[in-house]
Amino acid sequence: MRGSFLKALTLKATAVGSLPHKNPEEAIDLIFNEFSEIPFWPQLSGVDKHEEMTVQYIQGIPGIIYDEENCKYYYDAQSDEFFEALEEFFMDYEAIVNEKDFTNLDKYAITSPFTSAIPLYLERFKAGSYDFAKCHIIGPFTWGTSLCDENNLCAFYDETYREVLIKGLTLKAVWQIQQVKKANPKATVIMFMDEPVMSQFGTSAFITVKKDEVVEALGEIAKVVKDFGALCAVHCCGKSDWSVLIDAGVNIINFDAFAYSKSLGAYAGEMSDFLKNGGYIAWGIVPTLDKEALEKTNLQELEQKYEAAVDDLVKRSKGKIDRETVIKQSFFTPSCGAGSLPMNLAKKAMKLVNDLSKSLKTKYGVN
């Protein structure tokens, strides 16, 4: 990516997505007060169950059937209705992605009750002056392994339906990018794909999933996101085979850097190429997945953990990565969403990640 992005992102802070708020206005206030450099729109499942991550993106995707009463959903890729909708869906995708014809893009919008925050976010974003907007979709591997048909077959194993999910999520990403552009044409969107299940890739749970299938799924979305002028990130709240994300062509790797702070070192060779090509590391250094750790941690501990992780990556690269490069190509998030936390701890996490950003920017002379 262009070098100007690199300088602008250095040591900044944003967050992963979910918050525990039941009042969307209060959530938006918190975000724009704490994350004035990279504000994000929040998932608020406490406002409505439709905002839960695996449900929030189903609008407009053919074949998905949602059981409101039992709060469950599945896909049906065998019905006549599905095949009729599928032809129109692929035509829409071709027009929107390849021809930049946005006539039917709103069919793939995220609207109420699937979000309470996006309209408020866009209103606030338009009223201010921001260089970046952090947006997000669920990742195709996570969605494809959590969405099943009535026979319990995961969508990721169904080649046809996997393609539907990939293209559907791509359209969700493009819709968000276009909404931000309308609000502020000069802002750069950072589009996160939330992939918690990537931490299980390569384990016995998904032993039949091939690496190139995951790379292709992530890569197809990443390419379109970048073609539309945005940066593409993948969030995995754990450790993973980071070479998958690098091979997929993402700009940013975001991971749980509190619990797995040194996991990047095992891929020092791949990380060297990633950083040389302008990639960024978004260190999920504030422990939102561990309430006890979050209660006990402080700014000093987080700084020390970050510095130690940087030193480990540099050391294990055996001279291929220098410390200055890692620091210049770092920014910060909590380790995962804060939606399951009590309000006081969620607010502490948001404050800590910003305090860390400010402290390290002062230390390293970053404006």
Image: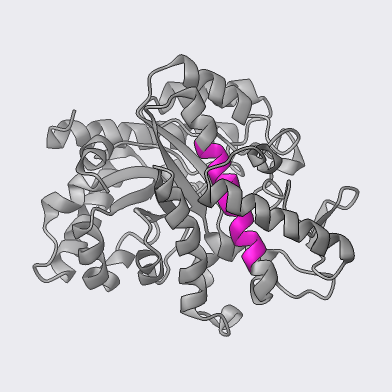
Which part of the image, by quadrant, shows the C terminus?
A: top left
User: Which residue does the image show at 13% across and 54% down from the upper left?
Assistant: 323
Left or right? Give the position of 290 relative to 284: right
Q: Using the image as rendered, state which of residue 26 and residue 54 is in the foreground.
A: 54
User: At x 45% / y 49%, what residue is drawn?
Assistant: 225
Principal SS element in the magenta part?
Answer: helix
Residue furthest left as drawn:
319
The stretch drawn in magenta includes residue 169: yes
Q: Position of residue 188 (x, y in %)?
A: 38, 35
| Residue at x-position 36% and y-position 48% | 285
Residue 316 higher or lower than 351, as above or below: below
Q: Position of residue 175 (x, y in %)?
A: 57, 40
The answer to whether residue 286 is seen in the rendering is: no
* Residue 349 painted magenta: no
x, y percent for residue 124: 51, 19
96 displayed left or right of 222: right
In this figure, which colouring scheme has been used for the structure? Answer: one colour
- Picture quadrant of residue 187: top left
Q: Is residue 46 above or below residue 61?
A: above
- Residue 166 drawn above or below residue 283: below
- Residue 320 locus on image (x, y percent): 12, 67
**Image mark count:** 0
Drawn side of residue 275 relative to residue 188, left or right: left
Q: Is residue 205 visible?
A: yes
Boundaries of the magenta span: 163-177
Q: Residue furthest top?
A: 127
Relative placement, left or right, of 255 versus 363 is: right
